[in-house]
Image: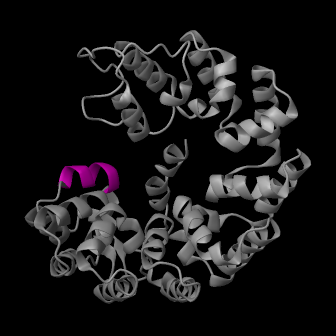
């Protein structure tokens, strides 16, 4: 499901190049001022030594200055300790550089409390190299000129900082390509801004892809018989993830899905429109999910009627089927609509079932209160 893909964003943000300063030197001995300052801030020194010990050998370092800036923004001592334990590279940033970043981020996220939360979750995005400041400013100005919501811009900066570090011309080219595709597929100009905001929000990394990827994907799908209206509908459903696709992977996945479900080209297109996951999940994953559903007694015709059930892992499917069975609902003979969807969707459907009495059951998939 799209949410699963979206969870990789925070991990990708950590790939931002580390701050570099010509004056910094690496010593064979630890910088005791840095060690003592981190210790006074209750930072887990052992964790820093284990994962990024080289930082403790750098000089100069600005541990106290970084902590003071975060405190001035409203960060508590525990939050400061967590930030520096996760991203100790922050202590290598010059105070002037940090102040410049603070002013930059405040222009799109004026509430200090929210900004502290962003820094806590995406420290690598905030404590970036000073050499990127000009590109960041230019990109902020560009996205503001598109009248995008400030929250969207902030999310882009936090989860896809590379897109703000690259020349603004690259982002302009990709945005124009997306807008052109939207118009050519019959999208209404009045809805362009909302459509673009949703797309960038769902997958900020779309800006890092070559525009050719989007064109190749659309040409491939058009060759597979999707109409202009269907392509617009699909593009809206896939949002930014349309750029994660390529003709070779889609060709393989579609061939497998069509063979597994025994459907026609027209039926396959309807299935893809209802469940875009059929396009971007590898055939290995789809094979596992088909097997899991069929093993639970679900028929292939049921899957074809409700293909969105393929967005669920086998564990989640089995867990939901067991819960439904406790209510007297047999997924093998009923609609899979009650089974599919997000956790919230399932709980709402489940709560409406009045076919039996629910008995307490241990959840073998996840701890109590955890997302399934």
Side of 350 relative to 177 (left or right): left
The residue positioned 41% from the left and 32% from the top of the image is 349
Looking at the image, the residue that sits furthest to the front is 354
Towards the viewer: 138 or 147: 147
Q: Position of residue 238 (x, y in %)?
A: 65, 52
- The residue closer to the viewer here, 48 or 105, is 105
Q: Check residue 247 for magenta coloring.
A: no
**Quadrant that contains the C terminus:** top left
Name above or below for residue 288 compared with residue 130.
above
Identity of the residue furthest to the left in this view: 40
Q: Position of residue 228 (x, y in %)?
A: 83, 58
Does 253 appear above or below 180? above
x 27%, y 80%: residue:
111
- Left/right placement of residue 204 relative to residue 188 reads left
Measuring 70% from the left and 29% from the top, which residue is drawn there?
283
For image coordinates 54% across by 77% down, the residue present is 165
Is residue 238 at all visible to an observer of this figure? yes
Visible residue check, residue 62: no
Which one is nearer the viewer's eye here, 365 or 21? 365
Toward the right, the furthest residue is: 223
Q: Main secondary structure of the magenta part?
A: helix
Residue 49: say if magenta. Answer: yes
Question: Seen in the image, is 134 located left or right of residue 196?
Answer: left
Indicate the quadrant where residue 236 lies.
bottom right
Snapshot colouring: one colour
Range shown magenta: 45-52
Q: Position of residue 217 (x, y in %)?
A: 80, 54
Query: Of residues 90 and 339, which is closer to you in this image?
Result: 339
Residue 260 higher or lower than 255, as above or below = above
């Amino acid at each position: 499901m799209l949410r699963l893909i979206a969870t990789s964003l925070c991990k990708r943000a950590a790939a931002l190049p580390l701050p570099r300063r010509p004056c910094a030197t690496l010593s064979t001995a630890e910088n005791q001022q840095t060690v003592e300052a981190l210790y006074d801030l209750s930072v887990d020194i052992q964790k820093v030594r284990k994962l990024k010990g080289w930082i403790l050998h750098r000089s100069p370092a600005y541990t106290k200055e970084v902590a003071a800036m975060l405190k001035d923004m409203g960060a508590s001592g525990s939050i400061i300790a967590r930030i520096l334990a996760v991203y100790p590279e922050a202590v290598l940033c010059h105070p002037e550089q940090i102040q410049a970043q603070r002013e930059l981020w405040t222009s799109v996220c004026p509430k200090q409390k929210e900004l502290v939360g962003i820094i806590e979750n995406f420290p690598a995005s905030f404590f970036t190299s000073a050499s990127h400041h000009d590109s960041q400013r230019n990109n902020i100005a560009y996205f503001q000129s598109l009248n995008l919501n400030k929250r969207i811009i902030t999310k882009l900066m936090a989860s896809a900082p590379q897109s703000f570090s690259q020349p603004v011309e690259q982002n302009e080219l990709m945005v124009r390509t997306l807008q052109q595709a939207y118009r050519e597929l019959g999208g209404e100009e009045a809805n362009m801004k909302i459509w673009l905001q949703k797309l960038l929000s769902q997958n900020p990394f779309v800006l890092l892809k070559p525009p050719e990827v989007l064109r190749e994907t659309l040409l491939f799908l058009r060759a597979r018989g999707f109409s202009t209206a269907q392509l617009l509908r699909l593009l809206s459903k896939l949002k930014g993830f349309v750029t994660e696709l390529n003709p070779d992977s889609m060709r393989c996945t579609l061939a497998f899905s069509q063979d597994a479900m025994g459907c026609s080209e027209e039926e396959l297109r309807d299935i893809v429109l209802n469940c875009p996951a059929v396009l971007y999940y590898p055939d290995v994953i789809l094979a596992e999910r088909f097997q899991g559903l069929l093993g639970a007694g679900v028929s292939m015709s049921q899957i074809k009627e409700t293909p969105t059930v393929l967005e669920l892992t086998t564990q989640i499917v089995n867990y939901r089927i067991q819960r439904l069975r406790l209510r007297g609902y047999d997924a093998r003979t009923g609609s899979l609509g009650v089974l599919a969807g997000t956790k919230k969707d399932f709980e709402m459907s489940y709560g409406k079932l009045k076919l039996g009495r629910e008995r307490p059951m241990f959840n073998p998939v996840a701890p109590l209160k955890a997302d399934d």
